[in-house]
Image (cartoon, rainbow, N blue to C red):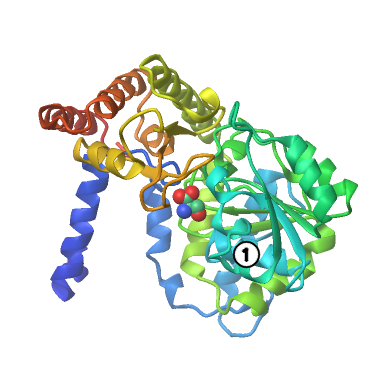
Amino acid sequence: MEHLKQADAVVHQAVLDEESRQLGQLEMIASENFASPAVREAMGTVFTHKYAEGLPGRRYYGGCEFADRVEDLARSRAVELFGADHANVQPHSGAQANMAAYFAFLQPGDGIVGMNLSHGGHLTHGSPVNFSGRLFRVAAYGVRESDGRIDFDMVRETVRRERPKLIVTGASAYPRALDFRTFGEIAAEVGAVHVVDLAHLAGLVAAGCHPSPVEHADVVTTTTHKTLRGPRGGLVMCREAHARIIDKMVFPFIQGGPLMHVIAAKAVALGEALSPAFREYGGNVVRNARVLARTLVERGVRLVSGGTDTHLMLVDLRDRDLTGKDAERALERGGITVNKNTVPGETRSPFVTSGLRIGTPALTTRGMGPDEMTRIGGWIADILDRPRDDTLITRTRARTTELCAAFPLFR
Ligand code: DSN
């Protein structure tokens, strides 16, 4: 980063500080991961200079032959990885991928059904503070209070009553496997389009450790930077019949020029995800999450649904004198980065919350395994038991620092 250092010492220092933060703490935010050096190099290339509005072979600018090459590569790798008919790799984010999917089928005022945000859904699945809640008529389903699992009776009842035009399946804080087949059957019953937002699960599906939604959905959207371990961005896949409308919704309806440097990095990440090593990675993410969840439960920490099938778990703090906000802060002081999260039946504000979301994708990328998860689970449980014990937090900080040093990134 010599040029950056010379040109802008302040930004240079912020980058170095952020790098030390990421390497020196246990990164357990379920939606974060570490992209490979190859992915990061591709993102920092001259492709950032290039305007390439349109699609490979049909651009509005000259000089696109190499942009076409990387975009075609990214598209074909996405199709191969997920077994989809068609892929558009241009969405700048998961939110924009979802917006393209909705506008391909809906007009303002049409009905959609999605998962309640405080039960584990996502802002773009119909929250009133998001475009999806503002533009569409939304009905939400949730999980059963008794076992924290999706209540399919409620899903069916909501869909039959509301007769939405579109059902969006997916979650950002649901620890259990998603039954895409049943959601697809419910959508078919009322003739609704079925959109799956795979953002959290994409890497697990790519690695073969979670059932694929592709044959049960009209459209599958995802981010590329979570379990898929690519650059920050979005992706839409769909059946051939919807290819043209999806492409038109991404550009020119929602976006302008694609971020070609990010698309080059998506191609690299999708290539990595096709490798046998990635299948092993996905399996390790899930195994690590199970070990961590079991350790926490054995220590008396309450988890929504009692455990996990995926890369994440949701701690329910309502049996403790502790908010999600304070728990997040105490763990961060101990060198463990997680995020506060609402829990089903939440009564506190999203800035305070009664829960914590914890995930294993990033630490698994660092090479940590079951032994480390058992140790980390113990440290988390200790801090949740004694969040105001400064001696404990200082001791934990020393231990997390030592563990991080033993697992440098990309050895
Ligand atoms: N913000 C992401 C997450 O943390 O799950 C979802 O978009």
Q: Residue furthest top?
A: 298
> Is 275 in front, or is 113?
113
- Residue 399 position, x and y percent, is 17, 27
- Residue 176 position, x and y percent, is 59, 31
**Label 1 beta carbon less than 8 Å to ligand 1:** no
Q: Is residue 304 left or right of residue 165?
A: left
| Screen quadrant of the C terminus | top left
Residue at 43% x, 44% y: name it.
Answer: 341
Query: In the rendered picture of this protein, how many numbered marks are placed on residues?
Result: 1
Residue at 36% x, 48% y: name it.
Answer: 352
- Residue 173 position, x and y percent, is 52, 42
Q: Is residue 256 above or below residue 333?
A: below
> Is 287 in front, or is 175?
175
Q: Is residue 2 left or right of residue 53?
A: left
Q: Amino acid at mark 1?
A: Gly
| Screen quadrant of the N terminus | bottom left
> Is 249 in front, or is 312?
312
Residue at 70% x, 38% y: name it.
Answer: 212
- Residue 119 position, x and y percent, is 56, 43
Q: Quadrant of residue 151?
A: top right
Residue at 31% x, 32% y: name it.
Answer: 321
Residue 89 seen from this side = no
Q: Is residue 40 left or right of residue 23?
A: right
Q: Which residue is mark 1?
A: 133
